[in-house]
Amino acid sequence: MKYLVVGSGGREHVISWRLLNDGSADEVYVAPGNGGIEEKYRIDVGVTDFEGIYSACIEKKIDVVIVGPEVPLVEGLVDYLQERNVAVFGPSARAAMLEGSKLFAKGIMKKYGVPTGQYHEINGRKAMLSHLDGVRSFPIVIKLDGLAAGKGVGIPENREEAITFINTMVGEDTRVIVEEYLEGEEASVLGICDGETVLPCVAAQDHKRINEGDTGPNTGGMGAYAPAPVITAERLERVRREVLQPTVDGMKAEGFPFKGILYAGVIIKGDNIQVLEFNVRFGDPEAQVVLPLMEGKLGDYITAAIKGKLSGMSLSFKNSHAITVVMASGGYPGSYDKGKVITGLNQVPDDILVFHAGTKREENNILTSGGRVLNVTAMADTLRAAASKVYNNIDLVSFDRAYYRKDIGHRALG
Ligand code: GLY
C-alpha cells in the first residue's frame, strides 16, 4: 500500500513512521513533510494546495491519503479528494466544523447531551466589552469561534487582562464564546471514527504552556505522555459513552457523519467529565505517544474507518508508557530564529525515537525551520523509566538556543 500523509509536523512524522513500522505501508509520502522524511518521499506542496495534492496522488499512485492538520480539513480537502475518487482519512468540511467553529461544536454538544461548560455567544468587540461590565468573577474563558492556530483562547484572571485580550483579539465582527472556567485535570482522548463506530485510544496528557509547572504562554504543546492515569479504564469508557459516541451519533443525525479522528479535550474533577474542546485530527504531540503504543496495524484501522467498517474491530494498546519532550527554538512561542544546525541526531540510542517537526534538510545538514523542532520520545514499563530515557539522552541533540521543559509528565510522576 502507498500512503500520502498531508502535513509537516511531528504528528505527520509519527504517522508515517508508524505506517512503515507496523507493516501497513510499502511506501509513505509526506506533503510537504520535514527534515525527518527522506527526500525522495517528500512532496513539495502545501497542505492547502488541493490540486497539487491530487496531482501527487495520481503521480505516485497513492492508495490512501491521511490528512494531519485542521486547516485543510476545515477547508474541504477530504471532500475535494473524495469527489475525485481518492480514498482519504479525515472528516468532511461540514464534519470538521466541530473544530472549525466552537459555536457549532457547542451547539452539537448541547443538542446531544454531551457534558460541557455553560457559555454565551457574543458578536463583536463592542458587545463583548459591554458583556464584561456584567462579569463579577474571574477567571473567565473567552474563545474566538474560528480556527486561530492555538491563539484563540484567553483565560483572563481579571478585568484588565480581559480588556487587553478583547482589544487585541476580538474584531468588530468576531464571533466569540464566553464560557465558565472549569477546574480540574485535562486529558486528550482520540477516537477513531467511521461515521458510526468510535474506537477510543489510550488517553494522553499534553503540556500546553511553555514553562515548567504549566506556566507562561500557551504553545502548540511542549510534550505529552500516555497513558494519562487521570483517565482510568472506567473514565475512558465514560468518555466513549458520554462524549465520543453521542457526538458521532449526533453528527450522523445532522447529516454530517464524522469519519476520522475525533479528539476530545476533556477536564476531570471528581466524577465530573466535561468537554473543553473538540479537534478533528490526531493531536500534536499526543500522536507521538499514542501511536507508538498502539497494537496492530494503523493502516487496518484507517482503511476500515474510510469504508465504514470499524464495527466489530477492537483497538488495544501495549502495556507500556510513552513520553515525548518537545525541543523548541529559543523564543518560541514568540519570535525565534530559524536555520540553526542540529547536531547529535545520530548519537541518540536506537530505543529513543526522534520525530521531526520544524526541521529541514539542506545539503548534509538538518536545520531548524520552526518553533517546535523535534519530539524526543521513549517507551518503557513505567512512565518514570520512559522519562529517564528521554531526559538522560536529550542533550545529545543540540542546536543554538534549544529549549525544552524538564517536567513533562509531572502530574503523573508526582
Ligand atoms: N496538542 C493540542 C492539539 O493538538 O491541538
Image (cartoon, rainbow, N blue to C red):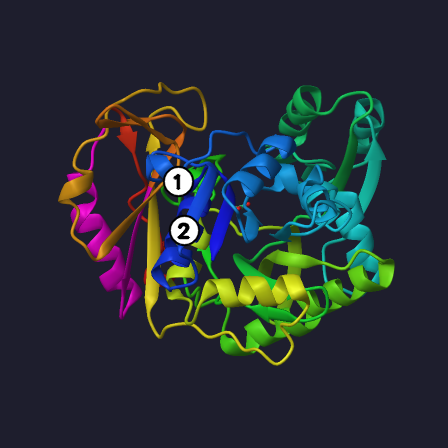
Dot 1 amino acid type? Tyr
Q: Secondary structure at mark 2?
A: strand
Q: Is residue 196 left or right of residue 19?
A: right
Q: Could you tell me how many numbered marks the image carries?
A: 2
Numbered tag placed on residue 27 in the rendering? 2
**Picture quadrant where residue 242 is located:** bottom right
Q: Which residue is mark 1?
A: 41
Between residues 173 and 35, which one lies in front from this camera angle?
Answer: 35
Coordinates of residue 113 in the picture (x, y in percent): 80, 65
Residue type at mark 2 is Glu
Q: Is residue 391 left or right of residue 77?
A: left
Q: Marks 1/2: CA distance?
A: 8 Å
**Contact (CB < 8 A) between labels 1 and 2?**
yes
The answer to which quarter of the image holds residue 366 is: top left
The reply to whether the residue tagged 1 has its Cβ within 8 angstroms of ligand 1 is no
Sequence-first tag of 1 and 2: 2
Residue 66's place in the image compared with 414, above or below, is above
Q: Which mark is residue 260?
A: none
In the image, residue 37 sits, relative to residue 252, either above or below, namely above
Residue 280 x %, y %: 63, 51
Secondary structure beneath dot 1 equals: helix
Question: Residue 51: x percent and y percent?
Answer: 64, 32
Range of residues picked out in magenta: 375-399
Q: Residues within 10 Å of mark 2 (few under 14, many from 20)?
A: some
Asked whether 240 or 132 is in front, the reply is 240
Identified at 33% across, 39% down, the residue is 38
